[in-house]
Image (spheres, grey):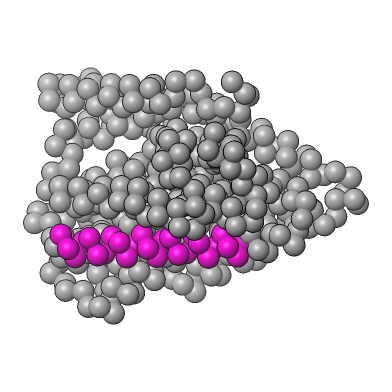
Amino acid sequence: MSILSAPKNLTRNVLIGMALGVLVAAFFHYYQNSTMLFDFVEKYVFNLGGQIFKNLLMLVVVPLVFFSLVAGISSLSNMVKLGSIASKTIGLYLFTTGIAVSTALIFGWIFNLSGYEGQVESFTPAGGEASLYNTVLRIFPNNMFGAFVENNMLGIVFISILFGIALNLTDELTGGLSKAFERFNIVFLKIVLLIMSFAPVGVFCLMGSYVMAKGLNIFGDLVQYVVLLIFVLLFHLTVTYSLLLKLLANLNPLIFFRKMRNVALFAFSTSSSAATIPVTLKTVSDDLGVKKDVSSFVVPVGATINMDGTAIMQGLATMFIASTVGVDLSLVQYAQIVLLAIITSIGTAAVPSAGTVTLALILGSVGLPLDAIGLILAVDRILDMIRTAVNVCGDAAVSCIVAKSENELDEQIYNG
Ligand code: ASP
């Protein structure tokens, strides 16, 4: 096993952690729910443990994206190629997200997704001032350090690309500084993997705090929304990506899915595409045969801007909320949702629950009440895990397609 492999038996341990979290928390929820012990365990075991795990993941997202992009771009042997890789990558990312949200709306319509009948919890969305104007402006921050401090991921991606290009072009003068970035990149990849050795405990706490508060009836009245959402996520994952891999790159999708299993589970455990970058990169390069020139750009950019699973959630959540408050969406509004979901998924940070916050932009734009987001919060934790797995599979599929078109895919490795 290499120094940069995912922790041993991660899949099995995470599943055990989840199951134990559910069992222990269900016991407390049903048999000990008014004791002091309950309060203590809820606050100091589940909530605190879960929050620490999420904080640790979010802590590494900014340096991880920065160093992986700078290291990748500064070591490209052929800079002219970057333009072609970048345009194909971004074009495909927008295209797949467009398909994702359209599929969600079509299935929502076919199955007549209907709203919620209970009380709507109040919810005040953060970052409600997001708009196309602000999203574009965030790509070009006026303060380099400000972008890092504010976790402005779009700005950080832009700065990293600029920095990587400059470093690449000045390599002779900067005395191999780009090597230093590659080494820093390795250190941060390792930090994520170290944090992930605690994932089984983290997932135990996250699942536990969820069940502790809600018991086992976690989907409650939201069953139709949850089932349909999971169905569309799986549909996009299996049908859309298979078709794209087959039609655009003539690759066998079954091999792709078999090799992506661990990456999907890693994303599922972290609910963060960004924290999954080390594992995605490794699988895409070592197992799927994408050469480093392509993967080092396509994967970190994808983790930041490509979120098909998130767009699917946002499409269905908007329909669900519209139906709850009795609004009939017009065709123009549906088109608006598709466009907005594409833009929003670019602007959504690749960290847990980010997509639920940016959903406010879509709701606001089609005139729906923002506090109705409170409705879907109850089920969002689990759905976030599943949609993040879809998000990273999208990044990997696009990596293979772009690599194939650039002659940068080793098909022997892919098929091996
Ligand atoms: N957790 C998702 C991701 O990192 C973003 C979201 O939909 O909340 O990919």
**Is residue 311 a member of the stretch shown in magenta?**
no
Q: Quadrant of residue 108?
A: bottom left
Q: Quadrant of the C terminus?
A: top right
In this rendering, does residue 282 appear at all? no
Place of residue 380 in the rendered image (x, y in percent of width and height, measured from the top left): 28, 46
Residue 262 versus residue 149: which sits nearer the camera? 262
Question: Residue, x 74% and y 51% (percent of image)?
Answer: 76
Q: Position of residue 47 (x, y in %)?
A: 33, 32
Q: Is residue 104 magenta?
A: yes
Looking at the image, which is closer to me, 46 or 132? Answer: 132
For the stretch drawn in magenta, the main secondary structure is: helix
The residue located at (17%, 43%) in the rendering is: 219
Instruction: Find residue 42 and report its horizontal and vertical position in percent.
Output: 27, 28
274 lies left or right of 158? left
Q: Nearer the viewer, residue 42 or 152?
A: 152
The answer to whether 322 is drawn above or below residue 167 in the figure is: below
Q: Position of residue 381 (x, y in %)?
A: 31, 42
Instruction: From this view, report whether residue 8 is shown above or below residue 221.
Output: above
Asked if residue 140 shows in the view, the reply is yes
Q: Quadrant of the N terminus?
A: top right
Q: Residue furthest left?
A: 117
Q: Is residue 287 left or right of residue 9?
A: right
Along the line of sight, which residue is nearer the eye, 216 or 308?
308
- Which residue shows up at 71% across the image and 60% down it? 81
Magenta stretch in the rendered image: 86-111
In this picture, residue 349 sits left or right of residue 203? right
The residue sitting at 19% across, 47% down in the picture is 227
